[in-house]
Amino acid sequence: MTENYRPGLTKRDREHDSALHPAWLAFFRYCAELKYGEIERLSIQDGLPVLAEMTKKKIKFTNG
């Protein structure tokens, strides 16, 4: 995945990524790379993501 790519965002949105805190960028990048799964108990401190206590990855074996 390229450094400045996030699915579903326009080029203009990606150009403004630098305005986001690195913690949010890391969280968004993780979510984009996860594709499917769950994040439980996301801890936010001072408006920033700091910890996902449990993460699960789901694997889909059918197209339906």
Image (cartoon, grey):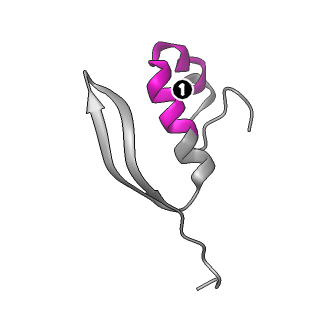
Q: Quadrant of the C terminus?
A: bottom right
Residues in magenta, as a range: 13-29
**Residue 2 sits above or below residue 39 on the image:** above
Q: Position of residue 48 (x, y in %)?
A: 33, 26
Identify the residue under disc 1. 13
Corner quadrant of residue 57 = bottom right
Corner quadrant of residue 21 = top left
Name the residue at the front extreme: 53
| Mark 1: few/some/many CA within 10 Å (<14, 14-19, 20+) | few
Which secondary structure is most common in the magenta stretch? helix
Describe residue 46's horizontal placement relative to residue 36 as left or right.
Answer: left
Q: Residue at the spot x=57%, y=37% of the render? A: 29
**Residue 1 sits above or below residue 24 on the image:** below
Along the viewing direction, whichever of 52 and 20 lies nearer the viewer: 52
* Magenta residue check for 32: no
Along the viewing direction, whichever of 20 and 51 lies nearer the viewer: 51
Number of residue marks: 1
What's the residue type where badge 1 is placed?
Asp
Q: Quadrant of the N terminus?
A: top right
**Residue 38 sits above or below residue 52 on the image:** below
Name the residue at the right extreme: 2
Q: Secondary structure at mark 1?
A: helix
Q: Residue at the spot x=74%, y=32% of the render? A: 2
Name the residue at the top extreme: 19
Q: Position of residue 61 (x, y in %)?
A: 65, 82
Q: Residue at the spot x=29%, y=38% of the render? A: 43
Q: Position of residue 23 (x, y in %)?
A: 46, 25
Q: Position of residue 38 (x, y in %)?
A: 43, 60
**Residue 61 sits above or below residue 39 on the image:** below
* Magenta residue check for 28: yes
